[in-house]
Image (cartoon, grey):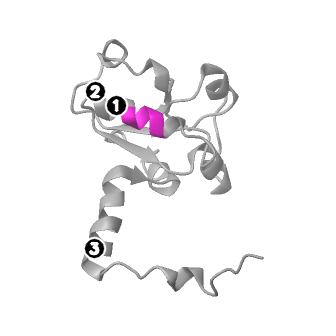
Amino acid sequence: MKVRPKNLVVQVPTAPPPEALAHFEAKFAHETDCWDVHATEELEDRGFVLVDVRSKEAFDKGHLPGAVNIPHWTLTPDRLAEYSMDTLFVVYCAGPHCNGSTRGAVRLARLDRPVKEMIGGTAGWVDEGFSLVTS
């Protein structure tokens, strides 16, 4: 019979506050969320290109307003040539059960492109009460 520790939360000591601060602040350099992206919808210049990295079929079924569809496996220098090298890309996929946005972020970073991942994906977007656009 397995004996579980009584308190898994405190089993591993917390990081010292300066280390925790560095960790949590660094997350903002790599991620954004549905609310922050949604808040940019009405801006004339969002300051980034919102990229749905799923298949065209998935994109057509429902995507975020203002998103362009560039499946992660097609993120190549030729495909990105229309964007300046300092363009920030915000990538998303279906949600927490999907790693397409992470794959896209890796590809963009390898191409020396600025990138953030929108956590939650389309599932998070809908969970927040926002609507998807269909093509």
Residue at the spot 70% in from the left edge and 81% down from the top edge: 3
> What main secondary structure does the magenta stretch of the protein show?
helix
Q: Please tell me whether residue 83 is drawn above or below residue 1 in the rendered image.
A: above
- Expressed as whole percent of the image width and height from the top left, the position of residue 101 reads 49, 38
Crowding near the residue tagged with mark 3, few <14, some 14–19, many ≥20 C-alpha atoms within 10 Å: few
Q: Amino acid at mark 1?
A: Leu
Could you give the CA–CA distance between mark 1 and mark 2, rounded to whole angstroms?
5 Å
Name the residue beneath numbered marker 3: 19
Crowding near the residue tagged with mark 1, few <14, some 14–19, many ≥20 C-alpha atoms within 10 Å: many
**One can see residue 50 in this view:** no
Name the residue beneath numbered marker 1: 108
Q: Amino acid at mark 3?
A: Glu
Name the residue beneath numbered marker 2: 111
Q: Earlier in the sequence, mark 3 or mark 1?
A: 3
Q: Secondary structure at mark 3?
A: helix
The span picked out in magenta is 102-106
On the picture, is 101 further left or further right than 46?
right
Q: Is residue 76 magenta?
A: no
Could you give the CA–CA distance between mark 3 and mark 1, rounded to whole angstroms?
28 Å
- The image quadrant that residue 63 belongs to is top right
Q: Amino acid at mark 2?
A: Leu
